[in-house]
């Protein structure tokens, strides 16, 4: 691994040694198997290709100062995948099998876990797809579950540094889809056009307002939103927001640090009152916001007047990372060790 510049990794795919797979057929899940092939062979009429019957998760593994590998909130990702399965009628993968597969694939690719102090981590991508041939909108009878891993650096360029975001009223995040990680049917695919346009204009990401009234903040294309004022952590409540495990964790940590926590509707005009704000998620961790521009209304909300992350954002970021890397004790049972 001497050829990998761990401290300058971007957020992208890098080939690793193995992936793991498991097939659902004849009403039951098979054995977890190890695979070296990066490719998937499937029928051209597979339901994942035609009807978006697929879901994926994202979580990370971290190497601590003690050399041990830690996975953050493994059980929460397993349960969120099950929630996705409920929403699009997929065969549920048992939590225990999800956890076994994640531990196996990380152990098999242990040499790709970035070293402590590099700022990088091992990104874990579980994927569940409908594979049986179907013409007509019906659920598949066969499914393939697989996990690959890849070492990654920060999701947003600059890492933990303030960056600009933009509101584009002409685009919707997605139709309300409940609490699952629905992708092709809504969340990520629907955000690509606006996301790329935002990047082309020099913004880190696009922020979406609610699809119905265009009055309330929802989230950005790849992360949840939080704002901070008067020592209060405020995050939107909406049926179309992906239930971020990172955001859920930050709410717990905010209360531990002495903050109040509010999960409620956040009207756009409230952006002018926030002392700090950020986007948060597994990939982004916390991406502090410098400003948010509303191009159609010709408004700019300056969040960071000095261009630096706020004090609460810094404390939350460093506390979360300290738990993930083992620099602080895990008092919540969030860490699973890879031994």
Image (cartoon, helix red, strand yellow):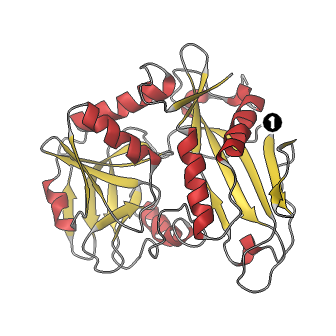
Q: Quadrant of residue 55?
A: bottom right
- Residue at point 82%, 58% (across, down): 28
Q: Which residue is mark 1?
A: 17
Question: Can residue 156 be seen?
Answer: no
Q: Quadrant of the C terminus?
A: top right
Does 80 sit left or right of 323 as displayed?
right
How many discs appear?
1
Does 112 sit left or right of 197 as displayed?
right
Residue 128 horizontal/vertical position (percent): 70, 58
- Residue at point 36%, 28% (across, down): 319
In the orientation shown, which residue stands out farthest toward the bottom? 136
Residue 40 horizontal/vertical position (percent): 83, 58
| Foreground residue among 298 and 337 | 337
| Foreground residue among 103 and 217 | 103
Q: Quadrant of residue 338?
A: top right
Residue 108 horizontal/vertical position (percent): 78, 31
Q: Dot 1 lies on which element? A: loop
Q: Quadrant of the N terminus?
A: top right
| Foreground residue among 280 and 75 | 75
Residue 261 against residue 169 in the figure, above or below? above
Neighbour tally class for label 1: few under 14, some 14-19, many 20 plus, Cα within 10 Å: some
Q: Quadrant of residue 144?
A: bottom right
Does 276 sit left or right of 220 as displayed?
left
- Residue at point 52%, 38% (across, down): 73
């Amino acid at each position: 691994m001497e050829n990998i510049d761990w401290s300058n990794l971007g957020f992208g795919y890098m080939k690793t040694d193995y992936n793991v797979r498991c097939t659902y057929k004849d009403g039951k899940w098979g054995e977890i198997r190890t695979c070296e092939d990066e490719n998937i062979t499937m029928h051209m009429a597979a339901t994942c290709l035609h009807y978006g019957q697929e879901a994926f998760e994202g979580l990370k593994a971290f190497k601590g100062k003690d050399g041990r590998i830690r996975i953050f909130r493994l059980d929460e990702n397993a349960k969120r995948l099950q929630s996705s399965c409920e929403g699009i009628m997929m065969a549920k993968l048992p939590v225990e099998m999800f956890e076994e597969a994640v531990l196996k694939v990380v152990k098999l690719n242990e040499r790709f876990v970035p070293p402590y102090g590099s700022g990088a981590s091992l990104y874990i991508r579980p994927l569940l797809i409908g594979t049986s041939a179907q013409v007509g909108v019906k659920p598949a009878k066969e499914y393939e579950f697989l996990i690959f891993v890849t070492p990654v650096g920060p999701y947003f360029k600059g890492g933990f540094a303030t960056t600009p975001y933009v509101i584009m009223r002409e685009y919707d995040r997605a139709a309300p889809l409940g609490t699952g990680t629905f992708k092709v049917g809504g969340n990520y695919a629907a955000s690509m056009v606006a996301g790329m346009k935002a990047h082309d204009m020099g913004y880190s990401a696009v922020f979406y307002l609610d699809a119905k009234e265009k009055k309330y903040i929802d989230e950005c294309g790849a992360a949840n939103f939080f704002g901070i004022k008067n020592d209060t952590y405020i995050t939107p409540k909406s049926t179309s927001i992906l239930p971020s495990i990172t955001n859920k964790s930050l709410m717990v940590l905010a209360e531990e640090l002495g903050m109040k926590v509010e999960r409620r509707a956040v009207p756009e005009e409230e952006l002018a009152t926030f002392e700090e704000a950020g986007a948060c998620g597994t990939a982004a961790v916390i991406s502090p916001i410098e400003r948010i521009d509303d191009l159609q209304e010709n408004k700019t909300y300056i969040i960071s007047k000095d261009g630096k992350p706020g004090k609460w954002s810094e404390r939350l970021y460093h506390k979360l990372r300290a738990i993930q890397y083992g620099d602080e004790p895990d008092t919540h049972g969030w860490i699973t060790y890879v031994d």
